Image (cartoon, rainbow, N blue to C red):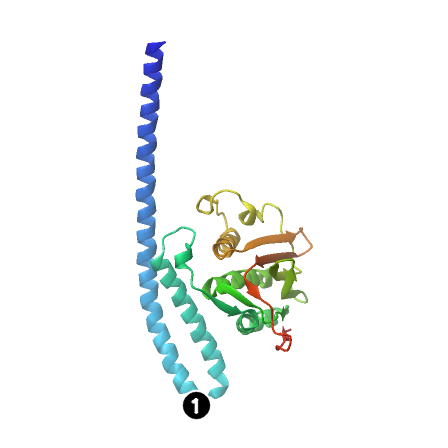
Amino acid sequence: MQEQLIKSNNEIQEQKREIQQMNAYLSEVNEEKDKIMRILAHELKNTLTSTISISETLQAEMAERTPDLLEYMQRMNSSLWRINDRIDRILSVKSKLPADKELKVTDINLAEVGEELLKQFGEVASEKGVKLQFKVEPYIVQLDWLYTHEILENLIGNAIKFSTAGKRVLVKTQEESDTLNIIVSDQGPGMSEQAKKPLTNPEPMDEVNIKSASDLSLTIVRRFTEAMGGTISCDSQPGKGADFILKFKDYQKPPSDGKFWGLFKS
């Protein structure tokens, strides 16, 4: 029995050494991946900085020569700066869930966010024949501006992508008990339980198996939503569209005499 115990102990120690070696290897691989991501981000940032400079120069000239095109140039410049901000985030954090200290939480007016997103996606939806509507009241919510845009851009972009001509995509706010809901609804093909898995997978976020662009998009949405203290769910069945529901608790109601949304694009 003593010999058996010694043998078992030796086997356990050997397994422990193998696990330690594997952990060291995985740590090295992860560090190498982060290094590559940072190199790529730096390269993108250098190119993007030059593009922003050109964009701002063109914007100044358009203001004098072709003022009717100025708005389009301003939108493009705004998009470039958003990409620039995202690259800064890549350079400042590693591949993990954002920590509280990495969030830039401010008072965000959801009606203003809706107006920006309407400008961003309105023409895309119109060209496809999709009716894009925003029924977003001016709630003030404690959120990270960049993450909020990233979440809604993913959800709205996917909703338009999977919608056909004549269908509607609706973004609205709704109070429920002690939460403020931001709902993105579409009349597309709907989602199976397997397709919704990135939103419900109980595994740690870094271990989620991403197999497609849709998986990546939903993983980003869930990751950023939870980082800001919110939750996300999806009410959908194949062939019956989808409702993505974001829930946040830290919000202020709009003033009774405040301006209402009224943002539409057909």
The outermost residue toward the top is 1
Residue located 42% across and 56% down the image: 100
* Quadrant in the picture for the C terminus: bottom right
Where residue 254 sits, quadrant-wise, is bottom right
How many labels sit on residues?
1
Residue 216's x, y, as percent? 49, 53
The residue beneath circle 1 is 65
Where residue 111 sits, quadrant-wise, is bottom right
Count residues near mark 1 (Cα–Cα under 10 Å), then give few for <14, some for 14-19, many for 20+.
Answer: few
Q: Is residue 30 left or right of residue 242?
A: left
Residue located 34% across and 21% down the image: 11
Q: Is residue 77 left or right of residue 137?
A: left
Q: Is residue 189 above or below residue 145?
A: above
Is 238 or 82 nearer to us in this picture?
A: 82
Residue 59's x, y, as percent? 41, 82
Residue located 45% across and 43% down the image: 207
Residue 117's x, y, as percent? 54, 70
Q: Is residue 11 left or right of residue 207?
A: left
The outermost residue toward the bottom is 64
Type of residue at label 1?
Arg
Residue located 56% across and 74% down the image: 115
Dot 1: element:
helix
Q: Is residue 104 left or right of residue 114?
A: left
Residue 21's x, y, as percent? 30, 34
Is 149 or 2 nearer to us in this picture?
A: 2
Is 15 or 66 nearer to us in this picture?
A: 15
* Quadrant in the picture for the N terminus: top left
Q: Is residue 107 above or below residue 199?
A: below
